[in-house]
Image (spheres, rainbow, N blue to C red):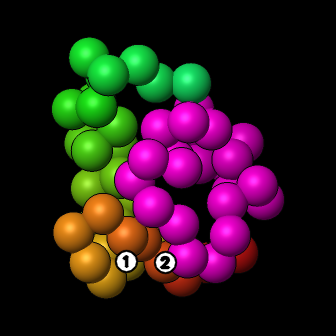
């Protein structure tokens, strides 16, 4: 996950969807793409969704 590797050190242990979008420089019309990327990262075991817009890192 190239994009995750580039922002994982900047993200805290727990981060919000908006913080992820800000760090990846996504605009409002790219939110669907960002959600799909977070969903893929969750399936691979990098992160876990703990609330509607809150995620926690599982792997460092």
Q: Residue at x 41, y 71 (%)?
A: 55
The local crowd at label 1, few if under 14, some if 14 to 19, many if 20 or more residues have their Cα within 10 Å, is some
Q: Quadrant of the C terminus?
A: bottom right
Along the polypeptide, which appears first: circle 1 or circle 2?
1
Is mark 1 in CB contact (under 8 Å) with mark 2? Answer: yes
Q: Report the front residue among 36 and 20.
A: 20
Could you give the CA–CA distance between mark 1 and mark 2, rounded to whole angstroms? 5 Å
| Quarter location, residue 25 | top right
> In the image, 15: left or right of 13?
left
Can you identify the residue that label 1 sits on? 48
Q: Residue at x 27, y 56 (%)?
A: 39
The local crowd at label 2, few if under 14, some if 14 to 19, many if 20 or more residues have their Cα within 10 Å, is some
Can you identify the residue that label 2 sits on? 56
Is residue 25 shown to the viewer in this render?
A: yes
Where 42 sits versus 60, above or below? above
Q: Residue at x 21, y 69 (%)?
A: 52
Query: Element at badge 1?
Result: strand
Q: Which residues are magenta?
A: 2-24
- Report if residue 33 lies within the magenta region: no
Q: Report the front residue among 28 and 7.
A: 28
């Amino acid at each position: 996950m190239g994009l995750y590797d580039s922002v994982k050190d900047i993200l805290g242990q727990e981060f919000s969807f908006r913080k992820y979008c800000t760090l990846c420089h996504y605009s409002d019309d790219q939110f669907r793409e960002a959600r799909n990327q977070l969903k893929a990262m969750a399936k691979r075991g990098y992160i876990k969704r703990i609330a509607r817009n809150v995620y926690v890192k599982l792997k460092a």
